[in-house]
Image: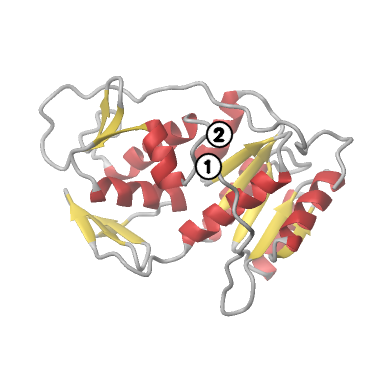
Amino acid sequence: MQQQPYEPLRTEDGPPRILVVDDDPTVAEVVAGYLDRAGYSVDRADDGPAALTRAAAHRPDLVVLDLMLPGMDGLEVCRRIRGQGPVPVIMLTARGDEDDRILGLEVGADDYVTKPFSPRELVLRVESVLRRSRPAATGGRLGAAGLTVEPAARRATKNGTELALTLREFDLLSFFLRHPGRAFGREDLMREVWGWDFGDLSTVTVHVRRLRGKVEDDPARPRLIQTVWGVGYRFEPGEPDGPVGPGESGEPGEPGGPGALGDRGDRP
């Protein structure tokens, strides 16, 4: 993926506020330093209770959250922060087990980065998530099968009842509504919805499963977001004309490489 110069978004109150939550002072310092140099306003916390206090005092535009925290783990912090409103969350994890990483997505994280990681990659992911969290300047109301999406207001409803969607779930539903009846592979969805040419495809699988849980009458037998065997997924607003199969699985990739952050010896 071609890397562009940092162009942080600005709000009426100044640059976006990023809350970095990590009990490793080296990681927190390096991440905060890169975000600060990229033009963001950065706040820090080294445990769960402190993160919740800072988030309540100064609501962040995005949270970079370590999964492994003392006292209260990142999953619980994510649940509580998400319970206060739709704040985008990028999860940091040193764990190599796919189940642990998927847990972060299941509780509402919008993205995750596995340690060791490149601080520059993290900043690019922050930029991507923030850009997609902004209300769309253009684009009309979308609707099908009792579902309605208003891109400008970032509001989605099912049969008139508002849906509590995360940032990525909203974008995924909007994309499906814009392309009914067309099958997309997980690589296509990663590129079109997440804005990345590479990444852990299980991220797509988890978000499709979460979205099905909110828009399907029976998520165990999805009729709207169908699995297309050997391809990926298709949004079908009408009655399906074939069998509907279970979701796909995939082997996640491992972010990292030269210059990666997360090893105790790393420095800015």
Question: Going 25% across and 51% down the picture, which residue do you hit?
Answer: 178
For badge 2, the amino acid type reads: Leu
Q: Quadrant of the N terminus?
A: top right
Mark 1 and mark 2 in contact? Answer it, CB < 8 Å.
yes
| Alpha carbon separation for disc pair 1 and 2 | 6 Å
Residue reaching furthest to the bottom: 12
> Residue 172 placed where, x, y %?
36, 46
Asked which secondary structure carries label 1, the reply is: loop
Judge by depth and name the residue closer to the eye, 2 or 121. Answer: 2
Give neighbour class at mark 1: few <14, some 14-19, many 20+ (Cα, 10 Å).
Answer: some
Q: Dot 2 lies on which element?
A: helix
Instruction: In the rendered structure, find residue 107 and report the number of the disc placed on it.
Output: 1
Q: Residue at x 63, y 23 (%)?
A: 97
Q: Residue at x 23, y 58 (%)?
A: 142
Can residue 262 be seen here?
Answer: yes
Q: Is residue 159 left or right of residue 248?
A: left
Q: Which mark is residue 103?
A: 2
- Viewer-closest of 264 and 222: 264
Is residue 88 something one can see in this rendering? no
Residue 25 marker: none
From the top left corner, tell me how far across and down residue 243 is, in percent. 17, 21
The residue closer to the viewer here, 141 or 51, is 141
Q: Position of residue 264 (x, y in %)?
A: 87, 35
Q: Is residue 173 left or right of residue 23?
A: left
- Is 189 placed left or right of 179 in the picture? right
Q: Is residue 8 above or below residue 111?
A: below
Q: Quadrant of residue 242?
A: top left
Horizontal and vertical percent for residue 203?
48, 35
At label 1, which amino acid type do we have? Val
